[in-house]
Amino acid sequence: MKMQESASIPKFTRKDLIPGGEVKWCPGCGDYAILASIQKILPELNTPRENFVFVSGIGCSSRFPYYMNTYGLHSIHGRAPAVATGVKLANPKLSVWVMTGDGDAMSIGGNHLIHALRRNLDLKIVMFNNEIYGLTKGQYSPTTQMGQVTKSSPYGVPDYPFSPLRLALGAGATFVARAFDVDGPHLQAILKEAALHKGSAFIEIWQNCVVFNDSVFDPIVSKESRPDHLLYLEEGQPLLFGKDKENAVISEEMSPRVVPASEAPKERLLVHKSGLQDPAYAFLVSGMTYPEFPVPMGIFRNVQSPAYDEILDGQVKKAKAKAKDNSFMALFDGLETWTIN
Amino acid sequence: MPSDSGLASQERTIVNKVTVRFAGDSGDGMQLIGNLFATEAAWMGNDLATFPDYPAEIRAPIGTLNGVSGFQLQIGASDVYTPGDNPDVLVAMNPAALKVGLKGLKDGGIVLLNTSSLTERNLQKAGLTKEDLDRIKSSYRLYEVEITKLTQLAVNDLGLTPAQAERCKNFFALGLISWMFNRKIEPTIDWIKKKFAKNPAIMEANEKTLVAGYRYGENAEIFSAFPLYDIPRARMNPGLYTNLTGNQAIAYGLVAAAKQAGLELFLGSYPITPASEILHELAKLKHLNVVTFQAEDEIAGICSAIGASFAGMIAATSTSGPGLSLKQEALGLALMLEIPLVIVDVQRGGPSTGLPTKTEQSDLMQAIYGRHGEAPVVVLAAKNSADCFHMAYEAVRIATKYMIPVIVLSDSYLANGSEPFRIPSPNELPEIKVQLRTDPNGFYPYLRDPKTLARPWAIPGTPGLEHRIGGLEKDSLTGCVSYDADNHEKMVLTRQEKIARVQQDIPDVEVLGSPDSEVALVGWGSTFGAIAQSVDELNRSGIPVAQVHLSYLNPLPGNLGEVLKRFKKVIVPEINLGQLSRILRATYLIETIPFNRVLGVPIRAQEIVEFVHQVFEGVVA
Ligand SMILES: Cc1ncc(C[n+]2csc(CCOP(=O)(O)OP(=O)(O)O)c2C)c(N)n1
Ligand code: SF4
Ligand SMILES: [Mg+2]
């Protein structure tokens, strides 16, 4: 949205975003925290409430639009990016958000996700990753850890999981980030950055499913684990972690390696830069997984390139400038016609 | 420029209709000269219908039977319903085209053969012997013309390579045929000038060849011994005409409707034969407020259209049978959301990949019933290429008025065939009045118009109307999710009732042919022309039959039951195994006599005539 519009935009508050009616997630579900964070940041985006559209697929997470007093469309399983594409192309002024789950986005909807990202259409794609199919009561998803016992994998999951971040990077997403449900301020900062980004944005949010996959992220995100196992990415800052930042991540033969900070060779110490055109660095850090590495949270990639809607708009302007006529009869321009009396 | 032959008016035989088939190698430009001949005939006021018939392989080996590309058209001085059952004239550019083209040629029909192509090798590839040629000579009126050689002579002073010179030979054939049937070649010359404006050498070569072919006819002795033809102008509605294929007509109908509605048009589509041209045509029309989106698959095609409709565009998606299967789940969503949406299905031979370039009418059931749940949608079908415009337009009218998805059925035959289309002025077209809701007072997402049961179209960006919709069952007023049993039943019935109300808004069926006869031929879609022609012939030969044609398949026209009960026998010709027939039996509890062919080609009028004879003779009950 253009900044000069801000003066005339009627203000709304977080309360205006609560539609009334019950929120039906399980008590203690991580989805509540994500909802609260989004309701918190929307009023700060200088966009009128009626210009927000939340589009979702199917899943617990995809119930999200019902709980936001904006325009919303709860579509069918996996197809939200495609529906959102139509909304955005119809009216590029709208701020269009895709709310999706790990099953919705990475399994049945994988095709739509990669293509929406590849086109760099200005959509905000927020994926609630609980590493499980919540709504269908606990089958493994494309992000469930290998070997995990779930309802549909009594002998352990035989699949290799996706890395959602690497999938998004591979698809060419221009904004790729990760956050988690319970760190509200961090999540909100990331969501705001994503909203300001012009182009496709992919945000993976780790979300705890208390019923079917409780505490899977605890080894990383619990208060006690964070210092040693979680690394907040900060622009321009070296990748240091530990209670006293005593550990560093360096690059060795194009791979990350953990060393004591005091021994890190300066030229090989990784320093966070999300604005690199080449996604190689983002790919490298997004591959840091538990328990070998501290798991990074933050913005992995944030680069500008022309968005699909802008490119399309340019084509329309060009076509309109060239056309002599845009009336009904212009349809038949260039066809052989004859008159019968 | 050649003038009309002075001899023409005396020596030419006046004919009412003629069917010509051009056949050659895929690279010989048969589709092009077929279309140009159609334009020449149209300029002279003939009615016509065309049928391009090309090989499934993009580049089949040269000179082989598989590589033969055909273009058939019927031109006439009175209503032309079809591209003709059996050609009167075959233009064959090589032995393979001769062999393929002879199938169906009328006994004693005219064959114009390019004898320059009769090499040992070509004959072998076509599996023809010298003896075969002799037999052909005795059964048909064979005219042997060295088309390739004469073409090379015509352009020999232009410095073209032999290959370039040879490529002009289709224009020689066109010139000659134009002369035989007394069609003016001016429109073709205009076309050549425009098309090759940037390449004067090729322009001149093609024009010279065309004129040479025409003159060859005037001068060559071979023709003087035989009758020449003329086809008087047909009585057509006055107006401005153009030639449209069915796919073009669908595209233009959608644009016209969006313009009438005062909204922009969105098409979300994934390429598939034979529907792709709808996407191609609309992609050219950005200046007319058309947005096209080539999606990653058919599901994304329809889903993007659903999004665009939600956000206030006239939205459509185009596909063929396999794509319609993929779209069905999303179509159910559109129906639940109660948003306007047009789905175009250009049918082809199925199931699965089936016969992708051939025609069939086998998607009727999947259009009407193909979704899970009680999921009724409106289904329309175009009866000829020009009607594709009107049905696409009608689909938008109904979709927006009732806030409902509408499927338009076309097929491969209509999609590729063309015929004269009278360009309507916008004020002749039915009204499409769209009201986007803006008033927040008393707004409920599912509060309905009492007459149409349409819910308000309230688009994102409108202050005060923020609301959520989705595929879960919703409360009949607020649109909020509701699992209440009574509410669900009410909503299922309401969605069905909406379809029923569309019936008040569509015309009754007409009975054509002999309305008082005891036998009716009932059809839908592209069999219209063949049925009309057969009814015409039967009635003229003293066998009274009536024709009932259905443009609206769901809901069916209000008077249909009463009309059908007037007849003792109801024959239903279809290019499937009896899909409409079953619907009529189930809906009206009447007996029907299905007549079904699934040969990948249109049913011929003659086949229907023969079948009706059998019914009259009691062979078929
Ligand atoms: C076409 C179709 N197939 C399957 C389902 C059943 N289904 C609903 S949600 C879901 C998985 C959802 O998982 P996820 O996207 O991770 O969402 P979560 O519930 O975990 O938030 C499945 C398989 C469906 N609704 N539609
Ligand atoms: S099942 Fe899991 S994801 Fe779904 S609402 Fe309950 S806690 Fe949340
Ligand atoms: Mg999940």
Image (cartoon, rainbow, N blue to C red):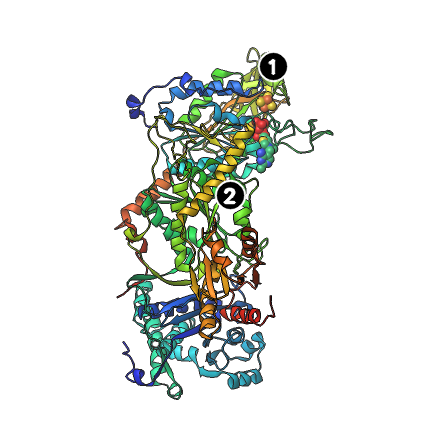
Q: Quadrant of residue B292?
A: top left
Q: Indicate yes or no: mark 2 CB to ligand 1 under 8 Å.
A: no
Q: Residues within 10 Å of mark 1 (few under 14, many from 20)?
A: some
Q: Where is residue A332 shown, x and y percent of the image?
A: 31, 56
Q: Where is residue B271 shown, x and y percent of the image?
A: 48, 50
Quadrant into which the C terminus of chain B falls: bottom right
Q: Where is residue B473 shown, x and y percent of the image?
A: 52, 32
Callout 2: SS: loop
Q: Residue at x 48, y 35 (%)?
A: A81
Of tags 2 and 1, the one toward the viewer is 2
Quadrant observed for ligand 2 in the rendered image: top right
Q: Quadrant of residue A31?
A: top right
- Residue A225 - label: 1
In the image, residue A330 sits, relative to residue B114, either above or below, namely above
> Mark 1 — on which chain does it sit?
A
Does A334 sit left or right of B567 as displayed? left
In this rendering, do the residues under marks 2 and 1 share a single chain? Answer: no
Amino acid at circle 2: Pro
Q: Residue at x 41, y 31 (%)?
A: B447
Q: Which is more toward the observer, B573 or A133?
A: B573
Quadrant into which the N terminus of chain B falls: bottom left
- Residue B620 - label: none
Residue A283 visible in the picture: no
Amino acid at circle 1: Ser
> Mark 2 — on which chain does it sit?
B
Q: Quadrant of residue B267?
A: top left
Q: Residue at x 47, y 70 (%)?
A: B544
**Disc 2 to disc 1, how far (Cα)?**
55 Å
Residue B466 visible in the picture: yes
Q: Which residue is mark 2?
A: B376
Count of numbered circles on the image:
2
